[in-house]
Image (cartoon, helix red, strand yellow):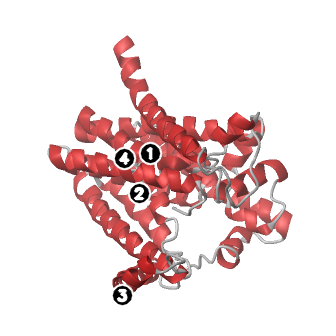
Amino acid sequence: MQEGRAAGAGPFWTLIAIRAAYWALGALALLWVPLRHGFPPFRAFDSRSDLLFGTFEQWDAGWYLRIVHHGYDVKASTAFFPVYPLAVRLLGSSLAVAILLSLVAAGVGAVALARIAEPLIGPLGARDTVLYVALYPVAFVFTSAYSEGFFLAFAAGAFLAATRNRPWLAGILGGFAVGTRLAGLALLPPLLYLLWPRGRSLKELARRVPLLLLPAALGAYMLYLRHRFGSALAFQDALDKVWNRHTSAAGPFGGLWHALYSGWQGFSELAQHLPRALGAPGGYAQRDVFAAWNAVHLVVLVAALWLTWIVWRRLGPALGLYAISIQIILLSAPVDVVPLASYPRYLLYDFPLFIALAAVLRDRPRAREATLIVFAALGAVAAVAFSHGIWIA
């Protein structure tokens, strides 16, 4: 029994330890350049704890903490779904609570992810899956007031519950996933597949009823928005008008084309302008920064689509349906100028990709080692940059 409990807790503590190490690295880096820009710092307890807990309080973290303290006081904040800020508010409303909740939730998600992966790729593959998630270059959001940790816990938990034939638990966790991020709707196809009735009896048909909790969660939020702002689609309006994330008329194909074109153009512009930018007194021009982002995003997109294909071919239809559904959602709403803005971070929702990566590299020790080293090195650079207010994802 002790071995089983230790094995069950292993993924949790692996992710916690790795992310805590990067958290400490980011905090130490701030000692050299403590002045940052952006949202005013949110206080924890004293100056030292403010530095530690405020390490990654950038960008979206400010919006989540605003909701925690003031509710949905402006329409722009409705783009951030309520489950995570509500949980923080219920447990104390402090910056420390927000970060620790995010980190613990990510650890719980790692446990669920390992249990999904183990029957498919074995114990070593499951361990590697957790390592890839923990070392993923933008996983610093697990130690910030971001909702990625919550989403991973709910989405992976819902999927795991469905594989174990527990429809009500799957439906409840799936509903919380939708209430955390709209991307939770990607759970519907795989959960329907996993919980499809095996017969025509009333009991078997009732297996699908709990899945109504997923659209119900979105419906509840929309009802609140209608009452608060007079529009059930206030979150969509905010994404469109404030965050410049427009739903493509061609769905994911429009976003895919926009991303491919912008990425190729980014590579072209970098090839032409990079020598000039390196020698310029002011450094990179904004246009060159956009080009670099689009080029990097194109590389990440190609890797993600390749891994999605691996998921479908090697890991089964359920995980394949989820991975495809996530990509459809992510590609259907590109952003102006940088169409795949935040796409690398959003891939943390697409947990089957990390299982696929572990499956591909399981019997390739050199490639596995190189991938872990690259993830770890890029993660350190990204964490330090993000802590200094540089946009990463």
- Tell me where residue 252 sits by quadrant: bottom left
- As rendered, which of 113 and 280 lies closer to the eye? 280
- Tell me where residue 102 sits by quadrant: top right
Residue at x-position 60% and y-position 44%:
31
> Which residue is disc 1 drawn over?
159
Mark seen at residue 272? 3
| Marks 1 and 2, how far apart at CA | 9 Å
Q: Which mark is first along the chain, 1 or 4?
A: 1
| Marks 3 and 2, how far apart at CA | 39 Å
Which numbered mark, 4 or 1, is in the foreground of this view? Answer: 4
Residue at x-position 55% and y-position 41%:
28
SS label for mark 2: helix
- As rendered, which of 271 and 17 lies closer to the eye? 271
Residue at x-position 77% and y-position 48%:
68
> Which residue is disc 4 drawn over?
376
Image position of 301 with respect to 158: above or below: below
User: Residue flagged by tag 3: what amino acid is it?
Assistant: Gln
Q: Which mark is first along the chain, 2 or 1?
A: 1
> Which residue is disc 2 drawn over?
322
- As rendered, which of 218 and 262 lies closer to the eye? 262
CB-based contact (under 8 Å), mark 1 and mark 2: yes
Which numbered mark, 3 or 2, is in the foreground of this view? Answer: 3
User: Residue flagged by tag 4: what amino acid is it?
Assistant: Ala
Image position of 182 with respect to 328: above or below: above
Q: Which mark is first along the chain, 3 or 4?
A: 3
User: Residue flagged by tag 1: what amino acid is it?
Assistant: Phe
